[in-house]
Image (spheres, rainbow, N blue to C red):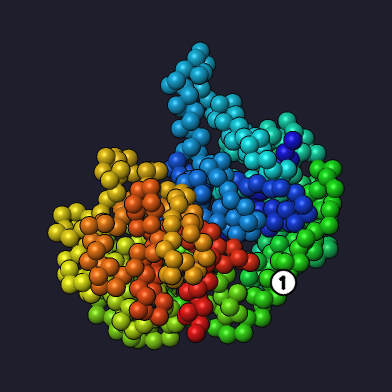
Amino acid sequence: MAKYVFVTGGVVSGLGKGITASSIALLLKARGYKVFMQKFDPYINVDPGTMNPIQHGEVFVTYDGCETDLDLGHYERFIDEELNYTSNITSGKIYKSVIDKERHGDYLGATVQVVPHITNEIKNKVYEAGNTSGANIIITEIGGTVGDIESQCFLEAIRQIQYEKGQSDTFFVHCTLIPYIYGSNELKTKPTQNSVRDLRNLGIRPDALVCRAPFNTTQAMKEKLSMFCNVPVENIIDSVDVKNIYDIPINYYEQKIDEIILKQFGLDVREANIDYWKKLIKTVDNLKNEIEISLVGKYTELHDAYISVVESLHHAGYKHNVKVNINWVDSEQLEKDADLKEVFKNSKGIIVPGGFGSRGIEGMIKAITYARENNIPYLGLCLGMQLSVIEFARNVCGIKDANSTEFNPICENPIIDLMSDQKSVVNMGGTLRLGNYECSLLKDTLAYADYKKDKILERHRHRYEFNNKYKDVLEKHGMVFSGMNEQANLVEIIELPKHKHFIACQFHPEFKSRPTKPHPLFDSFIKASKN
Ligand code: GLN
């Protein structure tokens, strides 16, 4: 029987609830328990796949092809477990499923209501994770802030779970803010007291508070919070601002949050296997050198739009003992008469990540030309691969009007074209080529040297593909197609052997990188950039 940890947030958004949930999960795993994580998002979209990355940030893709919130990326990076479609539930998904059931006649005779029909559906998603994941402990984060209209039904559902399962099977962590007031120069507990009162008005009593503050709270403040919030004083955990998010699990470990949870659950507090994480932090804190990598994209105004790419660059940096500094380059700016030499003057590598639509495309192509002509290590991800072949077709093979039908549906030379099984697709949501697909690697290539195996599985999120009609001409001019999906005959990886390091893939390797296990493509990219 699984036990359930719920993580809620109060006072303001952006407190790092996702990192708190991930850190707790990491510690419980380190104590020898199998953990599984999920996130509830209160918005009406069925998934974030149709949202603008500049508003919502990255869409993280699970191996089974679910488009999810970027917090799932943190979860996977912290706990090093692959999550799945049961891990990200939105209001849209819940309502859609209830309405489908209503139309099907599953509730015949009943008036379908938020309580109990919507709340039951939410509870089922929690219990489904408990029953199907094989985990001892499920950690569920509730998106939004207590008091939001949107998240009420999620809070009501987890209140019912607290009632049904009791204290020995549930643990509620409430993340709040302790602001510092300049002038009177003190930390203030009142917003936390108010937010716990809001939570208790909804019937939920938190078992622990995680207090985000610029520095640790005093014992006297903890006692005050304890008294006003009905939370034992030792269950009040400080979460001070850190330089590096990977420090947080250790901060919580020192305050014994994992022990507190396990004791409430009546589970053994086994010895924690945490040294590997402490070693990682030591590495991160003592990186010898720095390098600059240019990230050329169209969503650069919100860095969270590329969070997994950025983390993957850092992970590879940890392995090669370099701090990676990102030079954020808005591709649209490169389309005007930007001085590329100036833009890239300090960059040791250039990366073009994923994206959709035609804005900023020609700027990315300019950056790719610059990387190719100046022998600067290049890594292209998804759109970054599609544009690399367009660039090569135009500037090396002389196919001047080479393009993708995504940007010009009637172009004469569609080097990138809609996949055949996409041609009949009408709905935009959830219909891309998503999740794991196999890729076979060609021997004696950079890709093979990176992965050191014949077949790999990588996660995808795209609608367009390389048009095989152009394979011969590109090959003749020196491009190597080093990774192929054999079932569908799709190009997955391209490279330029004459170049110092030029490789691009149709999939998203950034979803599989871990702080202690950098992804092979990022590993070799940083290695090449460092040299
Ligand atoms: N827009 C491209 C496609 O749909 C690339 C997608 C991406 O970069 N994720 O195929």
Tag 1 residue:
279
Q: Image quarter for residue 301?
A: bottom left
Outermost top residue: 109
Q: 89 or 113: which is nearer to us?
A: 89
Q: 138 or 63: which is nearer to us?
A: 63
- Residue 515 location (% of width, % of height): 61, 66
296 left or right, relative to 522: left
Of the 4 image quadrants, the one containing the N terminus is top right
390 left or right, relative to 412: right
Q: Residue at x 31, y 55 (%)?
A: 465
Q: Image quarter for residue 284?
A: bottom right
Task: Determine the secondary structure under disc 1.
Answer: helix
275 left or right, relative to 470: right
Q: Is residue 56 above or below residue 162?
A: below
- Residue 188 location (% of width, % of height): 71, 62
Q: Residue at x 63, y 56 (%)?
A: 80
244 left or right, relative to 369: right
- Residue 491 location (% of width, % of height): 35, 58
Amino acid type assigned to the residue bearing label 1 in the image: Lys
Q: 425 or 212: which is nearer to us?
A: 425
